Image (cartoon, grey):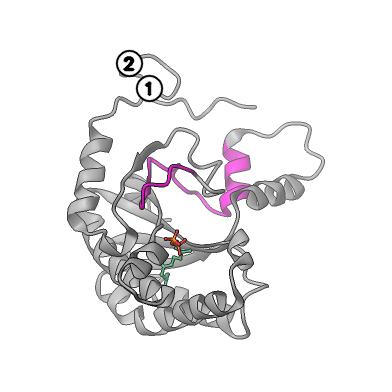
Amino acid sequence: MQSNLHSKLHVGIIMDGNGRWATRRGLSRLRGHQAGVEAIRRVMEAAPEQGIGTLTLFAFSSDNWRRPRSEVSALMGLFRSYLVNEVKGLVDNGIRLTLIGRRDRLPDGLAETIERAEAATAAGDALALRIAVDYSARDTIVNAAVRAGGLQSCSRETFSDLITGSKLRDVDLIIRTSGERRLSDFLLWESAYAELYFTDRMWPDFDANDLADAMASFHGRERRFGGLPSMKPDVSISA
Ligand code: FPP
């Protein structure tokens, strides 16, 4: 990750409420997810001017495979068309796209489509956009523990690298839409000291003003990282 992005904020968003948004309008749930893609566009364009360098969006959890097959396949189709159709817009906006999560259970060809989109946007330096698909924070932590093998001890920093596969800034702020107040297995390790922001807004309605409200709330918080007021975090503490 480029250091200029690392020095900017990392925001994670649990994009919730697409289904309810659609149902209330007499639309199919797919229409709600499609409207959710519009919200992604708005937020991604507004993020850099809000001081955000990394934006991680929760699009599909490893537990979402339990949804009806028709909805899962509609979502997979949406991911595929997003990856194909949005690349130009991402490049034009200087956005570097990566997908986090498992790729081995995705429909045929989707992993290759992801790789192409990642390669095409790799030079972006205005925003690192990470989309979580078939993602489980707990599985990620378990896999990192397996990779650490028989180590007697491991620093937090080293273990973080095992979890994220790269130098990744801890999450500063988690936003969840639709009035739900849970983390739902999203970025559990990286959010150890994240501020939490919950809004009743449904994800398809979320816009740049909502993001600005969330950021204003974030900037009004006092972050102590377990210390006393005005202390900076000490990330060098070993386990
Ligand atoms: C949660 O709302 C949302 C999802 C499980 C899918 C998120 C997907 C998108 C925002 C659009 C597609 C994304 C990309 C990257 C192309 P829900 O369906 O659980 O809503 P509900 O709680 O109201 O039923």
**Residue 89 in sight:** yes
Indicate the amino acid at tag 2: Pro
Q: Secondary structure at mark 2?
A: loop
**Residue 182 vertical placement versus 226 (above, below):** below
* Residue 181 placement (x, y as % from top left): 43, 42
* Quarter of the figure that contains the C terminus: top right
Confirm if mark 2 falls within 8 A of ligand 1: no
Seen as rendered, the residue at the extreme right is 150
Circle on res. 116: none
Q: Earlier in the sequence, mark 2 or mark 1?
A: 1
Q: Residue at x 37, y 53 (%)?
A: 54
Range of residues picked out in magenta: 157-182
Residue at x 31% of width, y 46% of height: 199
Residue at the disc numbered 2: 229
Circle 2/circle 1 CB separation < 8 Å: yes
Q: Is residue 82 left or right of residue 207?
A: right
Q: Which mark is residue 224?
A: 1
Q: Position of residue 179 (x, y in %)?
A: 37, 47
Q: Residues within 10 Å of mark 2 (few under 14, many from 20)?
A: few
